[in-house]
Image: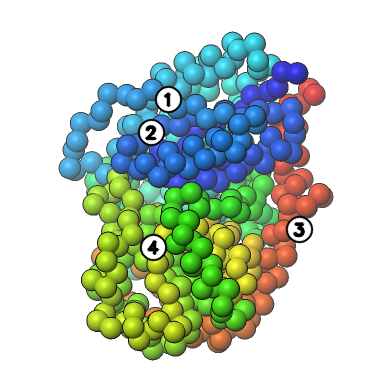
Amino acid sequence: MSKSEVVFISTPGSIGNLVPLVEFAQLLVNHDPRFHASILTITMPQRPTIDTYIQSRAAASATSINFLHLPTVEPLAEDENQSYLAYLSLLIEKHKPHVKHTIADLMSSAESNRVVAFFVDMFCTSMIDVANELEIPCYMFFASPATFLSFMFHIPVLDAEISDDFGDLDTELTIPGFANSVPPLVLPTALLSKKGDTYPCYLSHTARYKEPKGIVVNTFKELEPHALSSLSTSHVPRVHAIGPVVDHNGPAQWQDPDLYESVVKWLDDQPPSSVVLLCFGSMGSLSGPQVREIAFGLERAGFRFLWALREPPKSSVYLPSDPANVDEVLPDGFLERTCKFGLVCGWVPQVKILAHQAIGGFVSHCGWNSILESLWYGVPIATWPIYSEQQMNAFEMVKELGLAVEIRLDYREGSDLVLAGEVERSIKSLMEGDHVVRARVKDMREKSRMALMENGSAYKALEGLIVELMPKI
């Protein structure tokens, strides 16, 4: 029996965008066997772990999802003044002919009934042109929260109203997706200044957000009711809140299985909800001085901890790495003094660690995937944003939703150090102080699971999307 094809493409090099997109593709084909998914991938040699993830998922989803590697394009000329987003946007643009050719082949294949949709992500907006040329309905898959989607739609309005750099403003901003006014310093670093090429890139992408037929957002109604309501206007394509879409297995294939087993064994020996996990995502790392302040704060707080410590990458196109020698980046004697209640390790599959009963708190960079994982397993967060939209996510979690404890809301590269005393106070608040936040997180845990059940809000949203994709069937 031929199946209807759904095609996806994700921003290259971004595991945070790729993983939920793959999980959504899997959710769609599992929910309705009439679909088959093809995921187009742009290779970045600087990030081989992403290829490892793709190989693993391709093997696990051999019959329902096909991963198609696009041909490489002529290498981009290096420009030290070019931002990473500008580099990515040009790289994606150069792949348009390959994408058009690949989808055209799918459309002419005898194995496929028809290509019913092409899903692009937040920075692949140039691929809307391909969908239009091939006369395929185009949708956007948005891996960040509804609050940030609302902000992306509002950027052109702010740009027209405010001539100054946002980072220089001394007044808070009114953004439709937020119930509270938003401090300018929780905007993404790339948007604090209008100088350079990153800010125009954002404007260029957001200018095209009205073009897709619909937008699929990895969130759910019970979590972001205000933000989703703000998006229900004639100026925004129909929004489908189909989350939380979470990879519950985690990228375990990235790391040494012996290390993972030793970490789990250590956790098995700890009391329930007694350990605070410190993990800053696949792209998150901190400076040496900041690492030492965290170490002193952990030692003073005295709670059990598991710390996934990473070294900064060589440049923005590379990922952080595990330290060759943790003794060199930690204070003298730290490991010896904390060996009875703490464990420092390299990369671990975060979602599997959050699922462990010993975890009672999570110091997080506030990537949206991490937030959804923590809510799914009922683990409260202490906010330590680093890059991308994480500052706005942290603001939402603390000020809008009351689902997290604040360490910092506006931390980013170049911020003043979070000193040991602040780390100590925040961890104590996370682990024993704020029972209201912990109760709210537990409640949201149940709501996140109910959303995906039959007749849940996300289940109904997915059903509505399928009706759009295949209205005559």
Residue pictured at 38% horizontal, 33% vertical: 43
Disc 1, SS:
loop
Residue 77 place in picture, x, y as percent: 20, 31
**Residue identified by numbered label 2:** 43
Residue pictured at 48% horizontal, 43% vertical: 53
Residue at far right of view: 455
Q: Which mark is residue 346?
A: 4
Mark 1 → mark 3, Cα distance in angstroms: 38 Å
Instruction: Work out which quarter of the rendered image holds the C terminus and state it.
Output: top right
Residue 109 place in picture, x, y as percent: 60, 12
Q: Is residue 458 above or below residue 367?
A: above
Q: Is residue 207 visible?
A: no
Instruction: Work out which quarter of the rendered image holds the N terminus and state it.
Output: top right
Q: Quadrant of residue 147?
A: bottom right
Sequence-first tag of 2 and 3:
2
**Residue identified by numbered label 3:** 450
Mark 1 → mark 4, Cα distance in angstroms: 32 Å
Sequence-first tag of 2 and 1:
2
Q: Nearer the viewer, residue 370 or 304?
A: 304
Mark 2 → mark 1, Cα distance in angstroms: 8 Å
> Given the image, on which type of amino acid does mark 4 rest?
Gly
Residue pictured at 27% horizontal, 44% vertical: 83
Q: Residues within 10 Å of mark 3 (few under 14, many from 20)?
A: some
Q: Is residue 273 left or right of residue 2?
A: left
Front label number (1 vs 3): 1
Disc 4, SS:
loop
Q: Is residue 227 left or right of residue 186?
A: right
> Given the image, on which type of amino acid does mark 1 rest?
Leu
**Residue identified by numbered label 1:** 70
> Given the image, on which type of amino acid does mark 2 rest?
Thr
Q: Residues within 10 Å of mark 4 (few under 14, many from 20)?
A: some
Q: Nearer the viewer, residue 326 or 296?
A: 326
